[in-house]
Image (cartoon, rainbow, N blue to C red):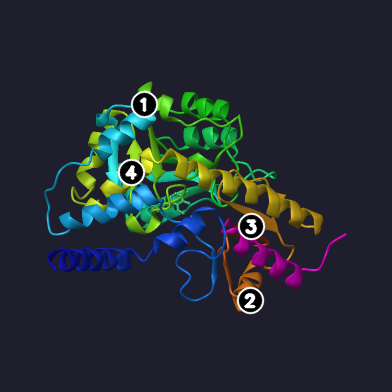
Amino acid sequence: MKTIVSRRRFVGHMAAAMACVSFPPALHAQNRAGIGRALDDYDGMARLASNENPYGPGEPVLKAMTEAFKYANRYRYPDPGIVRAIAESNGVQSENVLLGAGSTEILHVAATAFLQNGKKVIGVEPTFSSVYEFATGLRTNAIRLPLRSDYRQDVPALIKAVNASADEIGLVYVCNPNNPTGLIVPKQEIRQLLDGIPRHIPVLIDEAYHEFVEDPDYATSVPHVNEGRPVIVSRTFSKVFGLAGMRLGYALAPANLIQRMRPHTNGLNVSALAKFGGVAALADRAGQERVRTKTIELRKKIPAELERHGYSVIPSQGNFFMVHIHAPVTTAIGQFRERGILVGRPFPPMLEHLRVSIGTDEEMERFLAAFKEIFPKRA
Ligand SMILES: Cc1ncc(COP(=O)(O)O)c(C=O)c1O
């Protein structure tokens, strides 16, 4: 009797924990293989608008987070070692790591720390524009440079513009690979940028999509952190690790820059669940590899089909791609929505390009069928 009661209780607790995260393990396993619908299919929409990972966290990560529920009522609990794990996985020291509630918090903290007294941020447009928006909140603004005609970031133009207004600039923002184009800034150009601008201006290099890059001309900028350059690398657990809803990201930077940013964070910004999940996610190499491999497979397959249909696609290194639709993107977004597919927002001035996040096999097939229905084959 005793056993039955405790087993029942145990099952009850597990069910409650699972309900909270709503990942039935069987469905989860099925989706990790990239088969079937997305995990959180609550309204039948294919979610291809936010560059998320449709498979969600893997079993070891889910287990670690489920176990961490028991600390939900505490400010203090055993340290899961997330800072150490991040430092080790990136080859830096713990003093070079700052945690954020997602990398968006890191972008916010960098803006707050370095854009005081009307200092401006400079970077390209379109890009992930959060830093530019935070600048507005700080009563300053962004100097936005156009992309080159091949949609790449124009590093010589950026160097020139920084030097032309060096006294006004508090932060340089480079998204690498860039969202929404998916194009990288090659490693030699990152070095040129760092060599070509005054050393007192920090460069924030947003590597949210780092894990999806295959291009050999790309390299992480973490070695520049170890060289003591004024570089802040931001990373996230929202993409390959599938933890967007948990909110975990971090900055890697020389200790003096971390010290300048830290007072602008809330020391309790990251939850116990996110910390325990993050440690498990870093250790789950097989899980990362499955997501990476499947994403890259679809990043090649779907654009190739669109090209065969007569539409060019920017060769992306992220978990998304941009297709030139030769029509207004706002109309297209509505047409896809009517067909149960959510696709990316407009990215001015690229208003005839549609950004599509890479979902499951099934979602991408639905996207492709809808695309062919909406857009006629081009010669
Ligand atoms: C380039 C880039 N940086 C940062 C983020 C923010 O991610 P998070 O706050 O979930 O870490 C995103 C999200 O899409 C992104 O595309």
Q: Residue at x 63, y 42 (%)?
A: 152
User: Looking at the image, which residue sits at the far right?
Assistant: 379
Locate residue 20 relative to residue 371 in the image: left or right: left
Q: Which mark is residue 350?
A: 3
Callout 1 amino acid: Gly
Front one among 104 and 321: 321
**Dividing the picture into quarters, in which one does residue 189 lie?**
top right
Q: Residues within 10 Å of mark 2 (few under 14, many from 20)?
A: some
Q: Is residue 130 above or below residue 362?
A: above
Q: Position of residue 299 (x, y in %)?
A: 64, 49
Q: Which label's residue is closer to the chain start, 3 or 1?
A: 1
Callout 2 amino acid: Arg
Q: Is residue 175 visible?
A: no
Q: Nearer the viewer, mark 2 or mark 3?
A: 2
To which residue does mark 1 refer?
91
Q: Nearer the viewer, mark 4 or mark 1?
A: 4
To which residue does mark 4 refer?
280
Looking at the rendered structure, the secondary structure element under dot 2 is: loop
Q: Are marks 4 and 3 in contact (CB under 8 Å)?
A: no
